[in-house]
Amino acid sequence: MTLLAKRYASALHLAAKGAGAVPQVESDLMALHAALQDRAVLGLLTSPDVAQAQRQRVVEKLGEGRHALVQNVLALAVQRCRQELLPDLYPAFRALCMHERGEVDGLVETPRKLGPDDLVRLAELAKSLCGKVCVLEQRECPELLGGVRLIVENVLYDGSVLSSLQQLEQKLLSASV
């Protein structure tokens, strides 16, 4: 995430807060972020071979149906030739919103997909560990064999079978015979 994207996101967040439109702007930025994952769209915005007028038409199309603040930030970014910040705008804005709500991102790694009840229990565990509401993303890692690895605020809580086996191996290797 670039410093420029953080600055634009901060200004947008302040404006959205003043307008009472933070949830709407966050939702629109998420949809915009998804649209920018398309290489063709991103190419039209960032390629030096594309004329400025064509970029503005692409931005107008991307901004259709979105909140006026989102449309304005899109137009401003293209007008100032800073369209390269657009893919990082949603993550930067989301980070500000999450901070304001007292939330953090977390990652759960498990050997198989967990059910919704398991994720709720892990989110409660994460909250008790870090003191904040944790929005968990799940990733399957079959090499863990069993158990769970939880990563919250750059802290790893490893309760996997793989980790236990590795610790046991180290104890056995270091034990005197």
Image: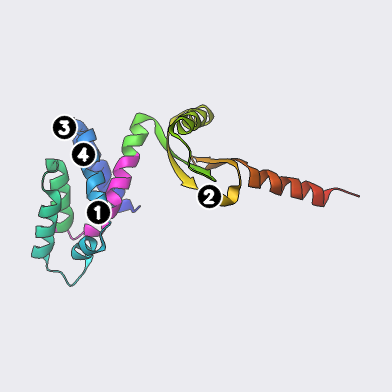
Q: Badges 3 and 1: C-beta atoms under 8 Å apart?
A: no
Name the element at disc 2: loop
Residue at screen point 19% across, 33% down = 21
Q: Badges 4 and 3: C-beta atoms under 8 Å apart?
A: no
Rendering coords of residue 80 (x, y %): 16, 58
Q: Along the horizontal axis of the image, is 123 left or right of 161?
A: left
Amino acid type indicated by mark 1: Leu
Up/down of 40 relative to 122, above or below: below
Q: Along the horizontal axis of the image, is 77 left or right of 124?
A: left
Up/down of 5 relative to 26, above or below: below
Q: Give the residue number, with chain letter if any, for mark 2.
A: 141
Q: Give the residue number, with chain letter if any, for mark 3.
A: 19
Q: Give the residue number, with chain letter if any, for mark 1.
A: 86
Instruction: Kindly identify which numbered label has been placed on residue 25.
Output: 4
Name the element at disc 4: helix
Name the element at disc 3: helix
Rendering coords of residue 35 (x, y %): 23, 53
Is residue 89 in sight in this rendering? yes
Local crowd at mark 1 within 10 Å, few (<14), some, or many (≥20)? many
Amino acid type indicated by mark 4: Val
Local crowd at mark 4 within 10 Å, few (<14), some, or many (≥20)? many
Label 2 to label 3: alpha-carbon separation: 43 Å
Q: Badges 2 and 3: C-beta atoms under 8 Å apart?
A: no
Local crowd at mark 2 within 10 Å, few (<14), some, or many (≥20)? some
Q: Badges 2 and 1: C-beta atoms under 8 Å apart?
A: no
